[in-house]
Each structure stands twice: as structure tokens, then as C-alpha cells.
């Protein structure tokens, strides 16, 4: 049966559509404790709960920034944290019209018999966890599946297993009132060209949407978080217009119109690259029955982190840097970005880390 | 590999887009010899080649009708026939801006172990046949897969086998320069409600597009010919607006935007019903990244056949009847049909035949 049976159907569709509001996008601030530790150590800040809390407070209270966001993805710890003056982060977000989201997967595990391919775990007890998160104020969730391009990759096993995991997760989320973001990231690592990336992306997305259909997921209440279609990290770069063309074509070939919004991941792209590519997609004159927006982590926070450097006297400078990137990406969702954002230190810096694990 | 590799890629995309021109649609005149025999006998006309030729000449030379058509599907015999004055039918059509199409399947065969479910045959030597048809002037093809709704139907086997057959056929057609019309007809027979039809339609279409992706078919160079989503033939009828809502939603959930046009089959609907339903779909304010048009057989020819009755003195009356339905359906593709077409005898008559076989 493909007809959807959740009491949350209308709410899911409404929230998913809201997240895709033109001019808005998602801040992915859901780095796990280990991953945020790497970020903090890159600016010589100790990885303790207070510092993690302070960083997120910096982000969520940046003046003027939240108007450009429709959602923020949180790690579990952050969902229950508060500002220094005691206000829960979820309230800070809700008061300015930003939906709180929650990362619910538990990382990747190697698939036996493959060459470094993985599946994503996190299904055990997922329904109970989602109910708790909904009660805490979360309204959407995220689950990251990872695939890679190689001579024999991605294998059919990896594609099927990851598509199935995404669909199981999505169905459970919808039963609990959380809009599932479906994220099938194909890593940018490798010497392949853009055509190869397009081919793999189309194959992976087709498998995902078949799985979602099999699992009776209501597409109107989901979001897609795909990679952009680009050359591999070891290949020569191409212009944003080329990335836009290949990316949008891949989506036209695989993503049903019922999906309200596509929120791209930034992968290893620099802040400026990610914004320029998103902008080029929104300028393209072609069929786009879903809005095209962002769900950026590194590509929204890099300059901010460097400006902050863990020092309270840098608060304003850091928050200004975040505002600049949020506004730029907001314009990119409208195709009006002029590429003139005052580049913060590191905005043009590649954020690629080989074989990236969150 | 999902990237398409045919020398005809541009031509296929151009022809598929042309068929979906707003204001135009397809006349399905591809009844096999046996099926056209039933039509002829219903108006007391003998089923001999000259009569079959005369009927098709009547249709293709109807003054003013061809402007509302972008394509006509032919049976093999008709592809090589001429007007009484000796002009090949394909030339008549081409001069009227109408692309000739060709039915290439060889009918249905029961699937072992199922309750009357079928698969469609016709793959043997298909490439050679398609090349011949292209040389004869055909530019698109049609293959009808049939599924039914029952207590345990359609089964996963029937869905997979028919989706696979459609994808194999489509890939071969594209290699030979013919735009494949993908037709997964779910018969209207039964006592099910519209929700059931929607559920089955979504499941079947999802399987079709997964198969098409697996078989490296270029969606921009294909067309879809689905059933509308309606209650079963033994269930109470619903308003055109309801049919429009369920149908378009099913398509939004399954048909990628890369498909340029969806050309509905009329099933057992009367001429007027089919037009009103198509019109309601085109009036609907919602995301529709493909044009919605018609590929009608019975629903374009019923009044014409009755008016003709096999008599030459009825030629003008018969051709006027065809013009009327063509114009009405053209308006329906624009959502401007006022329902005021002078109803020919039989226009409101149901054309449903239980368990219809062409």
C-alpha cells in the first residue's frame, strides 16, 4: 500500500513545505561530539560541553541570521541545551520561526565483503527516540547514508542497503511527526568526472525513491539532502553553471514533484563555492517542481568558527560572519546572489576532508 | 550506467516534447486486425483490408482535425497503406504536422501461476522491426502492459515483469530513433474505490520508473500513457475534479519532471467523460512539470464510427464528429473546455468492456 497512514500527515506536509520557503534554508549544526571536537581543536578550543554549548549559542543568537533559516539540525545533546541565561535552544529557534531538527542516525558501519562501503545504523528503538525528540520540540530529522564512487563502487548491495535504511528511517519518522530529511551522500572523493557523478547520482536517487515508495513514505512530508553533481575531488573544477546543469538534470530524472524541497549538502566545497553553485541552480531556466535550497554545515560555519577562535571578545565578529553567509545563501535560493559577500577568512577555502566522517 | 547513449538523443527529446505541445494530443488508431474487426462489426461493416483502409483514411483526412493532433498511433498494416488517391498515410500525417507512431507489442500472455495476470510479448527481433518502422516514417512507438486490481492483484511478479518488459522495449526503441510511449494500463474493472486505484497506480508507476532507470532509458525522450485514477467500473462514479486530484497527485509522487508529457488512455470512459476529466486536470492549480494530454482510441472515434456506419455518404458527418472530439480534447489540454461540444450519438456512452483486450 502506498497510501500514507499517519495522523501527522498534514503537519508533516506543512513543515516540509515551510522548510523549503524561498529565501530560507537549513543550518546543519548537528556535528557529533567527536566531529565538533575536530572543529574546536582547529581553533584551539577544548572539546567540553560548555564550549559546545557556547558555540551553538553563538550561532542561534546571531542577530539577523535566523530570518534566513527555516530549520537547524541539532545533535541530541544540543536539543536539551540552553542559553547562558537559561532559555532552551529549541525556544530560541521556535520564537524566530526556525524549526528544530535532530540527527537520528548512529553513524556508518562497513558492509561485509565490500571495499570500504558502508551502511548507516540507528534503526533500533528509533520510534521511541523520535517520540521523545518530538516532545522536546523537534519537527524534522536527519539520517545520513554514505556512498562512494570507485572502479566497482557503489555496488548494488551498497545502494540497496542504504536506500532501504533511508526508507525505513523515513517511515518511522513520519509515524512520529518528524519530517525525514533523506540524505544519500555520494562522496566527492575520487578522480572521476562530472558525467560519472551524474550517472551514479541518478542511479542512487532512483533507488531511494523506489524504496521510499515501497515503504509507504509520504513524499509531500519529506525533504531530500543530496550532493550536488560535481567532478571528483581529484579532477579539475568546472563552472557553477555546469554543476547547476548536471545537478538539476539528475534531479529532474529522479525526484518526484511531490517532494517540496531539495536542500543540498555542501560536501567539501568552500563557503563561496557552495553558494555560487546553489545560486546557479536557481538561475537556471528549466523545470524545477521543488525548491532548491541549502542544508550546510561547514559551508555556513567555517568563517564563523575562525572569527570566534573560542574568544568571547570575538562574539560580534563571529556572528557577523554567520550573518554574511546566511544572507548569501538566502539570495542563492532566489538566484540573486551577486558574489559580493565580504569574504570572511576561510570563505574561499576548500573544506574537503578525504573520506569524511562526521 | 544511467547516462543515455543513442545517436538519436536530441531527436528523441525534440519529438517527445513536440508530442506534448499544449493544445495537441494523440489519436490512438492502432487497433489490431481482430480488435478493429469488433468495431467494424458493431456498425455492420465487413472486416476486410479495404474497409480498414477506408476508415483510417476517413480519420486522417478529416478537415481541420489534424491541427489538434501531434501524433497518431498506427497498426503495422496501416503504416504502409495509402489514400484512395495513392498518397501514403505517413505523408498525409507528416504534412499535417502529425508524427506517425507504431504499435510494436504483440499482445498479452498469461503469467503462469497467477490469477489471470499477464505480461506483454514483442521483444523478439524488436530492434530490426523498429529500424524498419523508422525507415517507413514512424517516429514513436507504443507498447501496452496490462495490470488488474483484485483481491491479491496486482502481484509483485506481475508488476516487475511488466515494468521490466516496458523498460526493455523503451531502451530498444530509443536505440532505433523511436520515442517509446510507456503504457502500464491498470484496468478499471472491479469494485474497488478510487483510493485503491491511486495506491496501485503509485506502486506500478514507481516500479516502472525504477526499471526505466535500471535500463538506461533517457526519460526526456519518452512519454507516459497511464490510466487516470478513478473508482473501479463497478463502483459509484465521482466528479472530474476528484479524478483530477487523485490522478495528478499519483503522478506527482512517481513521474520524474524529465518526462515531457503524459498522454492518458481513456480505458472504458465515454468520449465526454474522458474529455471532462482531462480538462479538470489541466485546470488544477498544482505542480505539473509534464504536460497532460490525451492518447485516446475509443474516446476519440466512437461518435465518428457511429456517424460513418460504413457508408460513403456519411463521410462528412463522420469527419465532423471527429473534428468535434479533437477540438474538445485540445481545449481540455488547456483547461478551457466548456463541456459544450455538440454531443454526437454515443459521445456520452460508456465504452467499457469488461477485461478489455485489444
Image (cartoon, coloured by chain):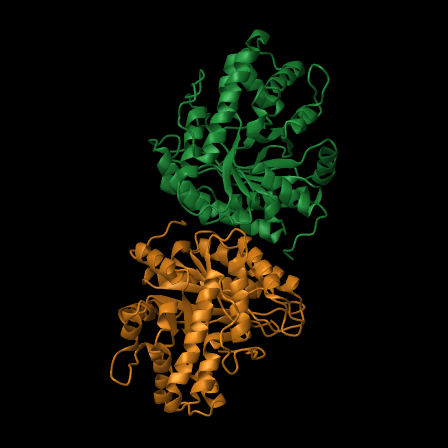
Chain colours: A orange, B green
- The x, y position of residue B188, in whole percent, is 44, 33
- The x, y position of residue B94, in whole percent, is 67, 29
Task: Answer left or right for A21 relative to A83.
Answer: right
At horizontal 40% and vertical 91% (from top left) the residue drawn is A311
Work out which quarter of the rendered image holds the N terminus of chain B and state it. bottom right
Query: Which of A90/A4 is in front?
Result: A90
Kindly tell me whether residue A213 is visible in this rendering: yes
At horizontal 41% and vertical 50% (from top left) the residue drawn is A2
Say above or below: A34 vs A245.
below
Say above or below: B215 vs B153.
below
Q: Number of marks in the image?
A: 0
At horizontal 36% and vertical 42% (from top left) the residue drawn is B195
Say above or below: A358 vs B73.
below
In the rendered image, the residue lying farthest to the top is B313
Query: Which of A139/B17 is in front?
Result: B17
Task: Answer left or right for A343 relative to B214.
Answer: left
In the rendered image, the residue lying farthest to the left is A86
Amino acid at each position: 500500500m502506498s497510501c500514507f497512514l499517519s495522523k501527522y500527515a498534514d503537519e508533516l506536509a506543512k513543515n516540509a513545505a515551510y522548510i523549503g520557503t524561498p529565501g530560507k534554508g537549513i543550518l546543519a549544526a548537528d556535528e557529533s561530539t567527536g566531529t565538533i571536537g575536530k572543529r574546536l581543536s582547529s581553533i584551539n578550543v577544548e572539546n567540553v560541553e560548555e564550549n559546545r554549548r557556547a558555540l551553538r549559542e553563538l550561532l542561534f543568537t546571531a542577530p539577523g541570521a535566523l530570518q534566513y533559516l527555516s530549520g537547524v539540525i541539532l545533535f541530541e545533546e544540543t536539543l536539551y541545551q540552553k542559553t547562558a541565561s537559561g532559555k532552551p535552544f529549541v525556544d530560541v529557534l521556535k520564537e524566530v520561526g526556525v524549526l528544530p531538527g535532530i540527527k537520528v542516525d548512529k553513524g556508518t558501519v562497513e558492509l561485509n565483503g565490500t571495499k570500504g562501503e558502508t551502511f548507516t545504523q540507528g534503526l533500533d528503538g528509533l520510534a521511541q527516540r523520535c517520540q521523545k525528540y518530538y516532545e522536546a520540540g523537534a519537527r524534522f530529522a536527519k539520517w545520513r547514508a554514505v556512498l562512494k564512487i570507485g572502479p566497482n563502487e557503489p555496488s548494488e548491495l551498497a545502494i540497496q542497503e542504504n536506500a532501504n535504511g533511508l526508507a525505513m528511517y523515513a517511515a518511522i519518522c513520519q509515524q512520529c511527526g518528524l519530517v525525514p530529511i533523506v540524505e544519500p551522500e555520494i562522496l566527492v572523493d575520487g578522480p572521476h568526472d562530472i558525467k560519472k557523478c551524474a550517472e551514479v547520482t541518478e542511479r542512487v536517487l532512483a533507488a531511494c525513491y523506489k524504496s521510499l515508495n515501497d515503504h509507504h513514505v509520504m513524499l509531500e512530508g519529506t525533504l531530500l539532502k543530496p550532493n550536488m553533481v560535481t567532478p571528483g575531488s581529484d579532477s579539475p573544477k568546472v563552472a557553477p553553471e555546469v554543476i547547476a546543469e548536471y545537478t538539476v538534470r539528475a534531479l529532474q530524472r529522479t525526484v518526484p514533484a511531490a517532494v517540496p524541497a531539495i536542500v543540498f549538502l555542501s560536501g567539501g566545497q568552500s563557503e563561496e563555492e557552495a553558494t555560487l553553485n546553489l545560486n546557479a541552480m536557481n538561475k537556471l531556466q528549466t523545470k524545477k517542481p521543488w525548491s532548491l535550497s541549502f542544508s550546510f554545515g561547514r559551508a555556513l560555519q567555517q568563517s564563523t568558527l575562525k572569527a570566534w577562535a573560542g574568544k568571547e571578545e570575538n562574539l560580534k565578529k563571529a556572528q557577523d560572519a554567520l550573518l554574511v553567509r546566511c544572507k548569501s545563501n538566502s539570495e542563492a535560493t532566489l538566484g540573486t546572489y551577486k558574489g559580493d559577500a565580504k569574504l570572511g577568512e576561510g570563505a574561499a577555502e576548500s573544506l574537503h576532508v578525504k573520506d569524511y566522517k562526521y
